[in-house]
Amino acid sequence: MRISSLLAAGVSAACLAASPALAAAPDAKAVVDTYVKIAHATYEDALTTAQALDTAIDAFLAAPSDATLAAARDAWKAARIPYQQTEAFRFGNPIVDDWEGRVNAWPLDEGLIDYVDASYGTESDANSLYTLNVIANPKVAINGGEVDATTITPDLLAGTFQEAGEIESNVAIGYHAIEFLLWGQDLNGTGAGAGNRPATDFDTANCTGGNCDRRAAYLAAATDLLVTDLEEMVANWAPDGEAAKGLLGGDPKAGVAAIFTGMGSLSYGELAGERMKLGLLLHDPEEEHDCFSDNTHSSHLNDVVGIRNVYFGSYVRVDGSTVSGPSAADLVAAASPAVAEELKGKLDTSLGAFETLAARAEGGEAYDQMIGEGNAEGNAVVQAAIDSLVDQTRSIERAVAALDLGQIAFEGSDSLDNPDAVFQ
């Protein structure tokens, strides 16, 4: 089924909630309450799909085969859909932004984790642990000291190897570490094809790649940790959780500002800039978000859907039920119907641009191929999606002004603000 089809019900519900017709403004506290409820529901869905991923990985490790590996990969892709929709909560809420690197940090230097192709190289001036290969080495040296990695546990991965040496590209945990273990490196550059790790890399009876027992232990530990980390964030957004209480017990105007901060920062600096424009400028497949699985089009589309969810105050859950209520869109419609209509149109345009991008990927040209040098048509599709995000951010800024929320600093990106710096 096409991703756009999976999301169609959610988008339709959001659009129905988006009418900018003249109406009395809802209470800002009620809008913040909707926001908190949607956050809790979306993180709950991210957790339940991660638990399903954990179950699929356990089944795969118990009986490694092409079929069980495919099922685990499918579960990983399914888990990304609700998680990416949570990213609209990130930038307006420090409790999320401070935690996010534990589950979604990227890009990663995969040689830290496992074997890599010779084309990867053997060293990096920026990372002394570039080819540490935890899976192959029960004892490793970090910062001049020996680390006993004989038993691979969630605590070892999170406490010792995540950002080891204070290097951000040493990503040892989260969705992308799991992705690398399930798919392996994508060695196709901007050509067709994703990673193609064999199931036998985890089969101790018919092992390829060496250290199959340790690779299985690493994958199991990383997936268990992902579930634990998501449980923490679900608890933060529960009615008595730290994130919920902070928003519901604080100034409602500040809560509304958090909504728009998350929308604008994800739209502009993070998605349009760091995740898209940078890779397009460099024509570099290493800069795509889900680079091992070629799932980037889905992750980007679901970021866009997540922005809509928080603005229109409506989220369609994995089980098909809807969480909705008074919304930021309602506030804008009451303050300035013209701005509300403008922003709705811009959000609709960006959704269309990303559905076009996703349809192209589902039709056979993956995102890393679209950003490849010389692919004028693919480049144009990506650029159109970027332009739609930049354009909608300007309307988000006008909505902030209409609501008199004061100055809100959205995340920026050199890729958009100072492209020359990218090449220096």
Image (cartoon, rainbow, N blue to C red):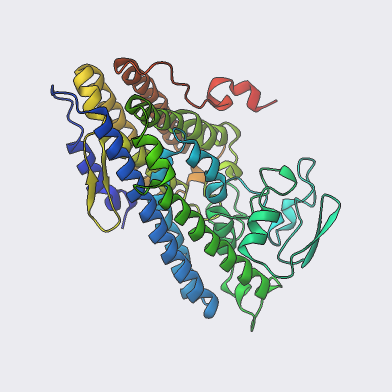
Q: In front: 290, or 112?
A: 112
Q: Is 231 placed above or below 349 here?
A: below
Q: Can residue 225 be seen?
A: yes
Query: Residue sitting at 34 percent across and 47 percent down?
Result: 239
Query: Residue sitting at 35 percent across and 34 percent down?
Result: 249
Q: Can residue 300 be seen?
A: no
- Residue at the far right in the pictured view: 144
Q: Is 123 placed above or below 48 here?
A: above
In the picture, the quarter occupied by the C terminus is top right
Residue 388: quarter of image: top left
Query: Residue sitting at 57 percent across and 31 percent down?
Result: 281
Image position, residue 250 (x, y; %): 37, 31
In the picture, the quarter occupied by the N terminus is bottom left
Query: Residue sitting at 47 percent across and 64 percent down?
Result: 73
Image position, residue 190 (x, y; %): 57, 46
Could you tell whether 344 is left or right of 113 in the image?
A: left
Q: Is 213 placed above or below 252 here?
A: below
